[in-house]
């Protein structure tokens, strides 16, 4: 797969998503997109001579800084509220608040140089795996040693992750197409800090109302490049 395929995939996904958003809520459109997106990644992986080094229980990447689009944050919050009891939800919120407090006075760049366990990483597995973010879906490695090196040396931002080019191209184009369709339908397309936005989504139901109305979903959460 050549680099020229990314715009082609983006255009295809944009056309499908834009049409779906004429009739569906952004949340339902996201779930349909997930199916197409995962299939593209699966096909790109199968068509490559390289293999992913990722396996269940390997969670180095779940300690890196995470950002997600507003619609993804809302979907993850909905999933947690539907599948976890109040005590479990409170534990997730407290874990996120711990991360927030730890990084409160850090710049965007400084935040990228510390390890923080994702509040949704429970027993070394993603608690919201079916609705995990696009960036989490896209992330993969061909050599887990690079992931471990980044985890062991978080301040060293020169450590590069080796990925499968075909998968990276397909996943990037697919995600760009969907998010552009959302943007052109007038929905909040900011990329938010996962911890602050997730807590706000769980504690303030008006986030969903603001998002559906085409307004900024989160008013106190940090957003990318803060």
Image (cartoon, grey):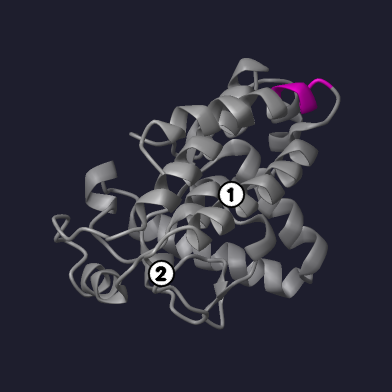
- In the rendered structure, the answer to whether residue 17 lies left or right of residue 112 reads right
- In the rendered structure, the answer to whether residue 156 lies left or right of residue 195 reads left
Tell me which secondary structure the magenta stretch mostly adopts. helix
Q: Which callout, 2 or 1, points at the residue further toward the start of the chain?
A: 1
Give coordinates of residue 130: x percent, y percent.
68, 61
Mark number displayed over residue 51: 2
Q: Give the magenta-colored segment's residue range.
A: 18-22
Which is nearer the eye, 46 or 205?
46
Give coordinates of residue 178: x percent, y percent.
61, 32
Locate residue 86: give its quadrant: bottom right
Which class describes the residues within 10 Å of circle 1: few (<14), some (14-19), or many (20+)? some
Give coordinates of residue 119: x percent, y percent.
53, 66
**Residue located at (39% from left, 36% from top):** 224
Mark number displayed over residue 40: 1
Which is nearer the eye, 25 or 53?
53
Q: Is residue 98 above or below residue 107?
A: below
Q: Is residue 30 above or below residue 153?
A: above
Which class describes the residues within 10 Å of circle 2: few (<14), some (14-19), or many (20+)? some
């Amino acid at each position: 797969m050549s680099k020229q395929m990314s715009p082609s995939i983006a255009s295809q996904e944009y056309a499908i998503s834009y049409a779906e958003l004429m009739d569906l809520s952004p949340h339902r459109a996201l779930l349909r997109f997930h199916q197409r997106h995962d299939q593209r990644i699966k096909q790109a992986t199968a068509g490559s001579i390289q293999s992913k080094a990722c396996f269940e229980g390997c969670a180095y990447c779940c300690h890196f800084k995470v950002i997600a689009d507003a619609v993804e944050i809302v979907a993850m919050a909905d999933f947690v509220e539907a599948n976890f009891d109040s005590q479990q939800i409170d534990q997730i919120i407290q874990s996120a608040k711990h991360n927030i407090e730890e990084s409160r006075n850090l710049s965007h760049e400084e935040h990228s140089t510390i390890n923080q366990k994702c509040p949704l990483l429970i027993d070394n597995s993603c608690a919201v795996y079916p609705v995990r973010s696009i960036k989490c879906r896209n992330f993969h490695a061909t050599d887990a040693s690079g992931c471990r090196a980044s985890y062991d040396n978080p301040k060293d931002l020169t450590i590069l992750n080796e990925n499968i080019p075909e998968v990276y191209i397909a996943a990037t184009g697919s995600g760009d197409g969907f998010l552009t369709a959302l943007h052109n339908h007038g929905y909040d397309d900011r990329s938010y800090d996962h911890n602050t936005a997730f807590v706000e989504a769980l504690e303030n139901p008006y986030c969903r109302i603001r998002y559906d109305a085409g307004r900024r979903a989160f008013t106190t959460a940090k957003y990318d490049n803060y």
